[in-house]
Amino acid sequence: MPLWLQWTLIIAGLIAIAVLSAFIVRQARLLKTNRKRADKNRAFQSERRQSMVESIQVIALAVEEDQVEYSEACLRLKGLLDHVAPELLEQSPFRVFQEVYDQIQHMPTHRARQATDTRFIEKMDKERLAIEEKHADAIRRAATALRHHTF
């Protein structure tokens, strides 16, 4: 084999080694960045979940102490439980939150309520209060169970 061919192959080999080394270093940095991003995302999701659990417990305590309307509590608890533990909404005693939600979800809230006719709002309020009264004991029991539930 001629000497020039040997040197050419050696140089080509060194270039290939340098290119592959640069590729490996770049991939390692990308992997490290992705791991950091995933760790931050996991930490954020964990904090968010913990915040939702705390909100659930505060709302449940407010129900127990009659500081919130039961219909509002059911709407909020159902929404939070959908994110934290949706399987609880199918179990007793927590099923009542889903039942009340299904019965009152069509009622206007916030701006829609303000834009709605007063007589219609009065009719909806009577319906809502009747639903609250019908499920009051079950809502209180479920709130107590939620407050003591470990998530």
Image (cartoon, helix red, strand yellow):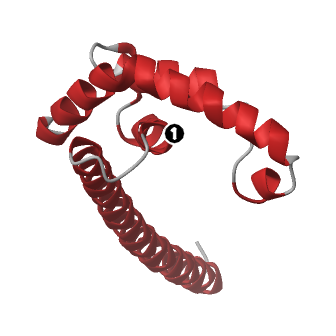
* Residue 67 place in picture, x, y as percent: 32, 53
Local SS, label 1: helix
* Residue 134 figure quarter: top left
Please tell me whether residue 23 is drawn above or below residue 59 in the rendered image.
below
Instruction: Answer with left or right where residue 99 lies relative to residue 149.
Output: right
**Quadrant of the snapshot with the N terminus:** bottom right
Tell me the residue at 87%/56% (across/down).
Answer: 115
Q: What is the quadrant of residue 127 in the picture?
A: top right
Quadrant containing the C terminus is top left
Against 106, residue 114 (above or below) is below
- The image shows residue 53 at horizontal and vertical percentages of 28, 50
* Residue matched to label 1: 75
Q: Residues within 10 Å of mark 1 (few under 14, many from 20)?
A: some
| Quadrant position of residue 33 | bottom left
Q: Is 10 in front, or is 28?
A: 28
- The residue depicted at 37 percent of the width and 61 percent of the height is 48
Which residue sits at x=56%, y=75%?
16
- Residue 107 in sight from this viewpoint: no
| Residue 70 visible in the shown view | yes
- The amino acid at mark 1 is Leu
Residue 11: x, y in percent? Answer: 57, 85
Image point (37%, 73%), residue name:
36
Q: Is residue 26 above or below residue 70?
A: below
> Residue 85's spot in the image, x, y percent?
35, 33
From what the image shows, is residue 92 above or below residue 145? above
Q: Is 76 left, or right, of 150 in this rendering?
A: right
